[in-house]
Amino acid sequence: MVDNFQFKDFYNIDDLLRIVEILRAPGGCPWDAEQSHESIRKDFIEETYEVIEAINKNSPEMLREELGDVLLQVVFHTLIETEKGNFTFSDVTDEICKKLIVRHPHVFGDVNVSSTEEVLTNWDAIKMGTKKQNTVAEAIYSIPRELPALMRANKVQKKAAKAGFDWPDVTGAFEKITEEAKEVDAAIENGNETEILDEIGDLLFAVVNVARKTGVDPEEALTRATDKFSRRFECSEKMAAGESVDMKTATLEKLDEYWDKAKKQEQTP
């Protein structure tokens, strides 16, 4: 047991900082002491998605727990840098506080705004200024490549649109899907793997454009479509099993029959 550690009925952020320090210190936990930014970076992503799951499930209890796990990741990564002498947890909180104050001049300054749109416009301008971004292209390149691809595409398109680089309405964006689909078909016909990769990417990018123009979140749209496919596949699989049909050897017509039935069942109130 660690000397001078006080067990309490209720812990605060200072306690969390101290506990992680103990875990990383000599005589603490060997696993925690061995970790680096790189070894636990995927844990951060996983914990973040679990917060999203808690929000989707509308579970305050789950959200409280998962936010704690995310906070642990923040503390852990900060402590690694503190050990290197680069910055502390106080430096992290100081920087985010200053950022919030600077980017909300309509709250902490004398700037007047009349709408949410003006707030966002000011936010983008201030962000570009503080990050010393002189062009929209620089702002686009600042969007992390590590984001989910659909999310990154959507953000890139929004940045470009604010600079006037956009279709006037959804019609042009939708027609682009047809154009890109034809290019995918031609690439498949040519059998060039690199060309197929590029053209499918262009097709997906065009679909994201239509989603953006219609106010749809492409990540959410694809998630819903995947959920729908999963439900209908499960139903089809059960129907095949009920008829002792092996889906691996069934004809396409038979599989379509199951799929159509599954679709109708889902649509029936």
Image: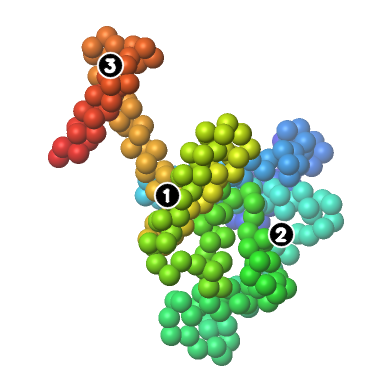
Which class describes the residues within 10 Å of circle 1: few (<14), some (14-19), or many (20+)?
some
Residue occupied by mark 3: 240
Report the amino acid beneath label 2. Answer: Phe
On the rendered image, what quadrant is the C terminus found in?
A: top left
Above or below residue 250? Residue 10 is: below
Above or below residue 90? Residue 218 is: above
The x, y position of residue 87, in whole percent, is: 78, 60
In the rendered structure, are the residues bearing label 3 and label 1 in contact, judged by CB atoms less than 8 Å apart? no
Asked whether the viewer can see residue 99, the reply is no
The x, y position of residue 85, in whole percent, is: 85, 56
Displayed quadrant of residue 246? top left
User: Mark 3 or mark 2: which comes first in sequence?
Assistant: 2
Badge number at residue 252: none
Question: Which is more toward the observer, 262 or 186?
Answer: 186
Badge number at residue 89: 2
Inter-mark Cα distance, 1 to 2: 51 Å
Callout in the foreground (1, 2): 1
User: Mark 1 or mark 2: which comes first in sequence?
Assistant: 2
In the rendered structure, are the residues bearing label 1 and label 2 in contact, judged by CB atoms less than 8 Å apart? no
Callout in the foreground (3, 1): 1
Question: Which is more toward the observer, 113 or 181?
Answer: 181
